[in-house]
Image (cartoon, grey):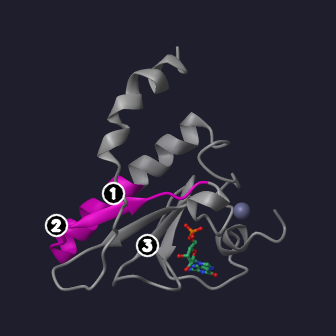
Amino acid sequence: MDDCIFCKIVKGELKSWKVYEDDFTYAFFDINPISEYHTLVIPKKHYENIFDITENDFLHLSKTMKKITNMYNKKLGMKNIQIICNSGSEAQQDVFHIHFHIIPRHKGDNQDIKWTTHKEWQENFDKLLEKLS
Ligand code: 5GP
Ligand code: ZN
């Protein structure tokens, strides 16, 4: 983890703009923000992504995200926020220390997440579920 930029941020070796900190989690502004207050929430302990984080540390992240979104709602009047966690390089993860993006949205921000949907894939749903049983 010596070359992990988010571990360096937690240790104070790299500058960051801190929004919130407790014993388990750290939250700071994304250096390339999509919107004002675009925030990253991370565990202080290094995990790569959703697959190796413990349930306990995942709970800590959830609580911190709730605190921050409550704060943005109360102090800044925010009512529109997207929360995203990219896990794996093919899922567009670039920094391999798990992080959640808290992305405030507002009318006219010129941002748009557009998914390509496939309604016709409904016919495969039963087969997909069989693979889980
Ligand atoms: P990912 O694509 O892995 O979900 O997101 C990584 C995010 O980390 C990007 O939005 C990027 O702007 C942010 N980031 C990368 N390096 C730094 C850094 O040194 N400081 C901060 N605050 N954010 C960073
Ligand atoms: Zn790390």
Q: Is mark 3 within 8 Å of ligand 1?
A: no
The answer to whether any part of residue 43 appears in the image is no
Q: Quadrant of residue 64?
A: bottom left
> Of the residues under marks 3 and 2, which one precedes in the sequence?
3
Q: Position of residue 55 (x, y in %)?
A: 56, 35
Mark 2 neighbour density, 10 Å: few (under 14) some (14–19) many (20 or more):
few
Q: Amino acid at mark 3?
A: Thr
Can you identify the residue that label 2 sits on?
79
Can you identify the residue that label 1 sits on?
67
> Of the residues under marks 2 and 1, which one precedes in the sequence?
1
Q: Secondary structure at mark 3?
A: strand
Q: How many marks?
A: 3
Q: Residue at x 46, y 22 (%)?
A: 127
* Mark 3 and mark 2: Cα distance apart in space: 15 Å
Q: What span is in magenta?
A: 65-87
Label drawn at residue 118:
none
Q: Nearer the viewer, mark 2 or mark 1?
A: 2
Q: Amino acid at mark 2?
A: Lys
Q: Is residue 17 above or below residue 40?
A: below
Q: Is residue 43 above or below residue 58?
A: below
